[in-house]
Image: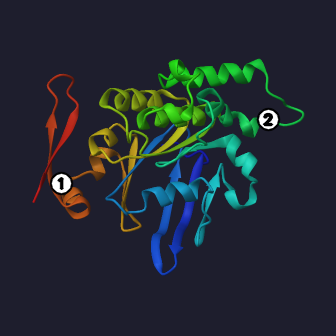
């Protein structure tokens, strides 16, 4: 990657909850336009890492940076103008409508001197269209399925027009058609992306992968370099080998239990 100042980085990032060490000594840097996938078994620290990088939680040790500036020295409004996050179990007030839920993404850009304009409406409409949810704009939140709610949350993040997008398993609750569509859409966005994924075959499409195990970063690099049979055995407890898709020549992971 480029030697330019990382868009998002962290140094010795650690997080404790009581006596439990959920994350320990994470060092990462993500360059402009890169898609970094975060993978690991359940409880490995994926969600905790994203929350620390989004300033949703305060680290026990270490720091996170946007363009070299510590998040601790930035106010939340400034962070929200640069970074948007889609949490795994995000929720929204039941009474709100879909358009208004997505419009919340414009909040960091609004003030008494910068009120809502037609430009903001256009951004919200485009965000809904990007996640194939334009037909839901007049629905209420409570009427949506789990998958529809997830797409609306992603649209809200897109309406923020962030430079950095953090997504915590964004394909949860989505059928396979929308899983593939969302991942394709995210990969085409002109943003720097960190995405926690459960499906390792989906993770193969990232530029790089960070593999977490029990709160530690155990591997970082291109997917084919770090998702080795040895690493998949040690971290995920599976036997694995690569197959070649005859349709397009892409590598596919075949995994079996021991």
In this figure, which residue is indicated by the disc labeled 1?
229
Question: Which corner quadrant of the image does residue 115 belong to?
Answer: top right
Q: Residues within 10 Å of mark 1 (few under 14, many from 20)?
A: some
- Residue 36 in picture, x, y percent from top left: 44, 45
Q: Residues within 10 Å of mark 2 (few under 14, many from 20)?
A: few
Which image quarter: residue 171? top left
Q: CA distance from mark 1 to mark 2?
A: 50 Å
Q: Which residue is mark 2?
A: 110
Residue at image location 55% in from the left, 24% down from the top: 128
Q: Mark 1: which secondary structure?
A: helix
Which residue sits at x=68%, y=57%? 71
Indicate which label's residue lies in the foreground, 1 or 2: 2
> On screen, 22 above or below 145?
below
Element under label 2? loop
**Left-right relation of 42 to 166:** left
Q: Residue placed at 34% from the left, 36% from the top?
A: 205
Label 2 near label 1: C-beta < 8 Å? no
In front of the other: 107 or 100:
100
Regarding residue 154, the answer to whether it shows in the image is no
- Using the image as rendered, state which of residue 18 and residue 25 is in the foreground: 18
Q: Earlier in the sequence, mark 1 or mark 2?
A: 2
């Amino acid at each position: 990657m480029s030697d330019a100042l990382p868009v998002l980085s962290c140094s010795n990032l650690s997080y404790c909850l009581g006596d439990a060490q959920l994350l320990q000594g994470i060092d990462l840097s993500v360059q402009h336009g890169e898609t970094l996938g975060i993978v690991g078994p359940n409880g490995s620290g994926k969600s905790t890492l994203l929350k620390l990088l989004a300033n949703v939680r305060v680290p026990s040790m270490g720091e996170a940076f946007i363009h070299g500036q510590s998040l601790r020295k930035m106010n939340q409004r400034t962070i929200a103008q640069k970074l948007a996050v889609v949490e795994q179990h995000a929720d929204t007030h039941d009474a709100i409508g879909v358009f208004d839920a997505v419009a919340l993404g414009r909040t960091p850009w609004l003030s008494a001197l910068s009120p809502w304009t037609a430009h903001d409406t256009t951004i919200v409409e485009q965000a809904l269209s990007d996640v194939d949810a334009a037909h839901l704009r007049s629905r209420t939140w409570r009427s949506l399925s789990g998958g529809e709610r997830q797409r609306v949350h992603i649209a809200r993040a897109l309406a923020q027009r962030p430079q950095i997008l953090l997504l915590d398993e964004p394909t949860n609750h989505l059928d396979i058609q929308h899983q593939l569509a969302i991942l394709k859409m995210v990969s085409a966005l002109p943003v720097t992306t960190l995405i926690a994924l459960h499906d390792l075959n989906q993770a193969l499409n990232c530029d790089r992968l960070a593999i977490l195990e029990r709160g530690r970063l155990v591997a970082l690099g291109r997917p084919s370099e770090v998702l080795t049979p040895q690493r998949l055995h040690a971290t995920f407890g599976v036997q694995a080998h690569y197959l070649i898709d005859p349709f397009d020549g892409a590598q596919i992971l075949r995994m079996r239990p021991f």
